[in-house]
Every structure is written in C-alpha cells, then in structure tokens.
Image (cartoon, rainbow, N blue to C red):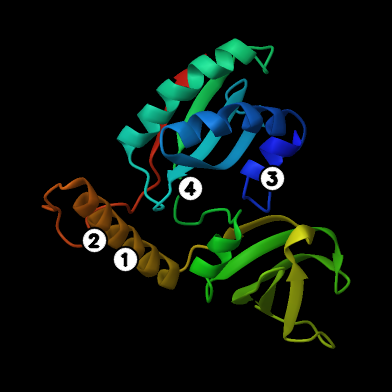
Amino acid sequence: MTATASEADDRIIRESGIDARIALIVQPVLRGIGFRLVRVHLSGQNGLTLQIMAEREDGTMTVEDCEEVSRAVSPALDVDDPIEKAYHLEVSSPGIDRPLVRKSDFVTWTGHLVKMETSVPVADRKRFKGKIAEAGEDDMLLERDKAAYGEEPTVRIPYDAIADVRLILTDDLIRDALSKNNRERKEAKKRRGEADDAPEGAEGGAEDEIEQEL
C-alpha cells in the first residue's frame, strides 16, 4: 500500500496480501460515490468469492446502495484485474454483528460484547471476549466476559495489536443497532429532503447484500 493510500485509509484494521491490493483499488471508487470501505475478503466460497463490505458515512447501507457499489467497483476491478480466476462479487452491508475497523466503531459500540484476536500476545493472550469498556485514542479497554483465575477483570489492548474484532449478537445489540439504524436513516432522509413514511423500527434489521458473477 502506498503512503498516499495509507493516509487516505482511516481504518485501524486492514487487509494484507491480495485483499490489501483489492482494497487499494476499490477504496477511491467507494469514496467517489459517498461510501467507505469496511472490509475486503477473498475466499474459496462458491469457487471463489470476493466480499466487499461497505457503508455510507452515516453507517447506513441498503440493497440499492449495494447495487450502486457493485456497478461502480466492477469496472475498476476489470481494469486492474487483481484476481486471475473467475469469481463471484458479493457487496454487502456490515450487518448487526459487524466487524469493527475504525476507532469511531469502538466509540459507537462501547458497552457491547465483542470477540477479538490480536496479532501479538496481550496479557499472555491472543483471543479475547468481553465488553468494550472504553475507547481511547491509542487503545481500548476490554472488560473480560469471564476472567480466568488470576486474570485482571479488564485488559487494555492497543489498536495496532488488534488483528480482528467483531460484535457478538445479543438482544442489547439488536435493540441498539435497530434504533441507531432507524435514527440514521431518518436523518439521511431529512438531509435529502425525502418524506419519512416508514414505521418505527421497520428498516435496517437484516444485512443487505447483492452478488454477481465475474
């Protein structure tokens, strides 16, 4: 990843290898149409599947948004051709039990349960489960779900040590995610001058995605 691309990527958890190369291609395309990248992942699912997870700056992502992203990134991927074999392109929203990739994600979801892996041992562990107790500038404080004998109930984990972290689906998370999504959609509609005719809680519950074969 070039220095310019790295500076433009405000994520603290990023891809490596072929995934990083693909992220470098699609990020400027996404920014150009008002979206931000959450994650890129190339897997062997259904032969070969490229998953691009994205969202609008306000955190919303509809099926129509997924279609727009798919139409925009496909030509860029065709030109650079980072994947030698035929593959399925899957564009999706982060979903409720989403990965956290930006500092702002940790702030937004403070108080919720996460599972986490670190790239290096932290407090003699590389896997953690617990609630985000605090989201600081350089690290986060995790309140362990079940501290083992002799372990401190909380552990401070530097952001640059985190390899992967995502929310765990709980009743509290579902309630807060639906409330947050509904609020953000209403605010987005107001900014666009659209009427809000959806009933409370009717939008944004499921993960939106669209898939095509390339």
| 169 relative to 35, above or below | below
Q: Indicate which label's residue lies in the foreground, 4 or 3.
A: 3
Label 4 or label 2, whichever comes before in sequence order: 4
For label 3, the residue is 14
Judging by the rendered image, the residue that carries numbered circle 2 is 201
- State the residue position of label 1: 179
The residue singled out by tag 4 in the image is 94
**Which one is in front in this view, the residue at disc 3 or the one at disc 2?**
3
Q: The disc labelled 3 sits on which kind of residue?
A: Arg
Q: Quadrant of residue 185?
A: bottom left
Which of the two discs, 4 and 3, labels the residue nearer the N terminus?
3
Q: Residue furthest front?
A: 4
Badge 4 crowding class, 10 Å Cα cut-off, few under 14, some 14 to 19, many 20 or more, is many
Amino acid type assigned to the residue bearing label 1 in the image: Ser
* Residue 32: image location, x then y, percent: 46, 32
Instruction: State yes or no: discs 2 and 1 in contact (Cβ < 8 Å).
Output: yes
